[in-house]
Image (spheres, rainbow, N blue to C red):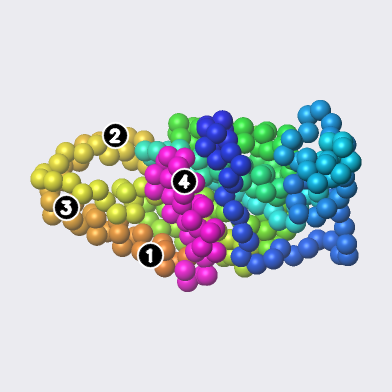
């Protein structure tokens, strides 16, 4: 999956745009100790084997007759933290695949834009940290951890690796981008209460990513009486259910009303959600890209 993300996106990361400027943790002028691909000039130097050929500064190279590259200051003022919901309901159908695609695309895009990136697993009593940092080597390890966790969630494996429980405020500075990826449904299949995320909305640039397919945000159009197989999201038990046209219409109405309540809950708190309803990388990338371009 990681290699597919890199091949599909390449040098076209999702243009992650903060809703408001991040609160700086340092005062005065400062420079990153790491060179990056930012906009602020740092210095010129001779081209070395292994440098990106696109970093060659043509004007200086022509003037001096020697291949010269330009170094720029890395822009790492922004932080991105992805929160993963690995509850049993995420193992239903292909929601774990949608969760994995969305998480990998956003982490990869954050790395390409030289942000500090991180990921945590949401639990009822806190958050399990998968790490927070910057740089290609760290990002490679983080992407592998996220993929392992999402694969385990998709397989219905409730056991999580031994991780350190960390409060969000210790990982993410105020104003940082917090993307909470979940179906936002409780054990009974109803919309989860919002107060658990209220603090995040006030402190961070909170972006809910709603991962729900057509069986949860509406209901598929079917014809005549239909025998369907349903999987209990909590127990994993497979059972056959006979649905009449009237019953299908009632279920469709209930699902659509539940999804409207979910959207209304977010809008009431000033949070505009992203809806992921298909697992393909192209669909997830388009939804994320469209969201940030419209900011």
Of the two numbered discs 4 and 3 on the same chain, state the one appearing first in sequence.
3
Residue that appears at 23% across and 54% down: 251
The residue lying toward the viewer, choosing from 44 and 274, is 44
Residue 98 lies, with reference to residue 156, above or below; the image says below
Nearer to me, 287 or 161: 287
Q: Tell me, yes or no, whether the two marked residues, 1 and 2, touch with CB atoms within 8 Å.
A: no
Q: Residue at x 74, y 65 (%)?
A: 23
- Picture quadrant where residue 56 is located: top right
Disc 1/disc 2 C-alpha distance (Å) = 28 Å
> Which is nearer the eye, 94 or 22?
22
Label 3, label 2: how many angstroms apart (C-alpha)?
Answer: 20 Å
Residue 261 has which mark?
Answer: 1
Residue stretch rendered in magenta on the structure = 267-295
Q: Earlier in the sequence, mark 3 or mark 1?
A: 3
Q: Secondary structure at mark 4?
A: helix
Please name the residue that numbered disc 2 is placed on.
238
Q: Position of residue 68 (x, y in %)?
A: 84, 39
Residue at far top of view: 49
Q: Is residue 11 visible?
A: yes
- Whether residue 294 appears in magenta in the rendering, the answer is yes
Given this view, does label 4 or label 2 mark the residue nearer the observer? 4
Mark 1 crowdedness (10 Å alpha carbons): few <14, some 14-19, many ≥20: some
Task: Select label 4 or label 1 by which is in front.
Answer: 4
Instruction: Nearest to the eye among marks 1 and 2: give it.
Output: 1
In the image: residue 241, left or right of residue 48:
left
Quadrant of the rendered image containing residue 5: top right
| Residues tagged 4 and 2 counted as in contact (Cβ below 8 A) | no
- Which residue carries the number 3 mark? 247
Between tags 4 and 3, which lies in front? 4
Graded by Cα atoms within 10 Å as few (under 14), some (14 to 19) or many (20 or more), the crowding at tag 2 reads few
Image mark for residue 33: none
């Amino acid at each position: 999956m990681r290699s597919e993300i890199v091949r599909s996106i390449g040098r076209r990361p999702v243009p992650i745009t903060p809703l408001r400027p991040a609160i700086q943790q340092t005062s005065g002028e400062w420079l990153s100790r790491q060179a990056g691909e930012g906009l602020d000039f740092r210095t010129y130097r001779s081209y070395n084997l292994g440098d990106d050929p696109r970093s060659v500064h043509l004007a200086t190279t022509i003037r001096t007759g020697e291949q010269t590259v330009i170094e720029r200051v890395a822009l790492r003022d922004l932080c991105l933290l992805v929160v993963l919901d690995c509850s049993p309901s995420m193992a239903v159908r292909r929601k774990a695949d949608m969760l994995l695609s969305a998480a990998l695309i956003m982490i990869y895009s954050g790395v390409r834009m030289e942000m500090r990136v991180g990921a945590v697993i949401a639990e009822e009593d806190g958050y399990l940290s998968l790490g927070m940092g910057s740089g290609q080597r760290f990002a490679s390890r983080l992407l592998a951890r996220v993929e392992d966790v999402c694969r385990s969630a998709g397989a219905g494996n409730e056991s999580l690796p031994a991780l350190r429980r960390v409060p969000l405020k210790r990982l993410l500075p105020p104003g940082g981008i917090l993307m909470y990826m979940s179906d936002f449904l409780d054990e009974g299949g109803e919309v989860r209460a919002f107060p658990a995320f209220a603090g995040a909305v006030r402190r961070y640039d909170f972006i809910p990513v709603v991962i729900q397919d057509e069986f949860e945000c509406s209901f598929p159009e079917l014809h005549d009486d239909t025998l369907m197989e349903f999987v209990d999201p909590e127990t994993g038990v497979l059972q056959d259910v006979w649905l009449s046209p009237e019953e299908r219409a009632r279920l469709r109405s209930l699902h659509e009303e539940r999804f409207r309540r979910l959207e209304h809950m977010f809008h009431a708190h000033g949070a505009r959600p992203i809806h992921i309803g298909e697992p393909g990388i192209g669909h997830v990338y388009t939804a994320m890209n469209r969201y940030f371009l419209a900011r």
